[in-house]
Image (cartoon, grey):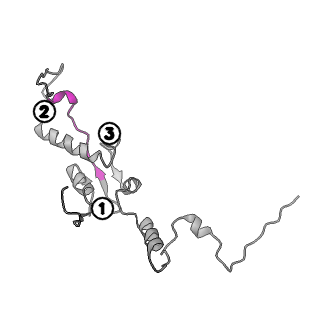
Amino acid sequence: MERSPKTRIVTHACSSLQGASVLLWLLGDCRTIREDARLYFRPTTLAEEDEVPENGKYEDPKYRDSYSAIDPDEGDYARVLEIINEFLPVEEMAGRLIGVPVLRQFGLTENEKVDNLLATMFSKRPQPVERPLNIMDQNRIQPGKKTRARQIRR
């Protein structure tokens, strides 16, 4: 992350992402993803008691079977999840498919409507926005059009 301020990394996902590839995509300065793509990262199987504490006193867990062997790669994956947690809430989203609308809510993908609005507002020459931002803009009365008045019966 100690790159030149002039360097800008653009990440574009042409398909769904899972695991550590989610982190690589998130680390881009400008992110795009196909509209039907999804993100997925599984929760880690490591528990906090699996790591040796700083003081060096390690106690064996109370229960361990043949399936609970520790995989060193799982420690690396736990670190990946820590960094992903800076962008998305890992505890709530791990093990679930995450769609593009959710990514937009977190501000992680380019939002075309907002970009068009900002470009129009800050441009030197006013340019009309290609399409209305919401349904309220579509329902507004345009100048020159007559409206029907309703009569109230008493």
Q: Which residue is mark 2?
A: 70
Q: Is residue 82 above or below residue 65?
A: below
Q: Give the mark toward the camera: 3 or 2.
A: 3
Residue 146 in picture, x, y percent from top left: 72, 77
Element type where label 3 sits in the image: helix
Q: Considering only order in the chain, which callout, 3 or 1, is on the residue closer to the N terminus?
A: 1
For image coordinates 27% across by 47% down, the residue present is 84
Residue 59: assigned label: none
Residue 98 shown left or right of residue 47 in the figure: right
Residue 98 shown left or right of residue 43 in the figure: right
Residue range of the region highlighted in magenta in the rendering:
39-51
Q: Are marks 3 and 2 in contact (CB under 8 Å)?
A: no
Is residue 69 shown in magenta? Answer: no
Residue 115 appears in which quarter of the rendering?
bottom left
Badge 2: how crowded within 10 Å, few (<14), some, or many (20+)?
A: few
Residue 137 in picture, x, y percent from top left: 57, 68
Residue 91: assigned label: 3
Of residues 57 and 68, the one nearer the viewer is 57
Q: Which residue is mark 1?
A: 31
Residue 102 shown left or right of residue 79 in the figure: right
Q: Are marks 1 and 3 in contact (CB under 8 Å)?
A: no
Q: Considering only order in the chain, which callout, 2 or 1, is on the residue closer to the N terminus?
A: 1
Residue 46 in picture, x, y percent from top left: 20, 33
Q: Considering only order in the chain, which callout, 2 or 3, is on the residue closer to the N terminus?
A: 2
Badge 3: how crowded within 10 Å, few (<14), some, or many (20+)?
A: few
Residue most extreme to the right: 154
Amino acid type of the residue tagged 2 in the rendering:
Ile
The quadrant in which the N terminus is found is bottom left
Residue 56 appears in which quarter of the rendering?
top left
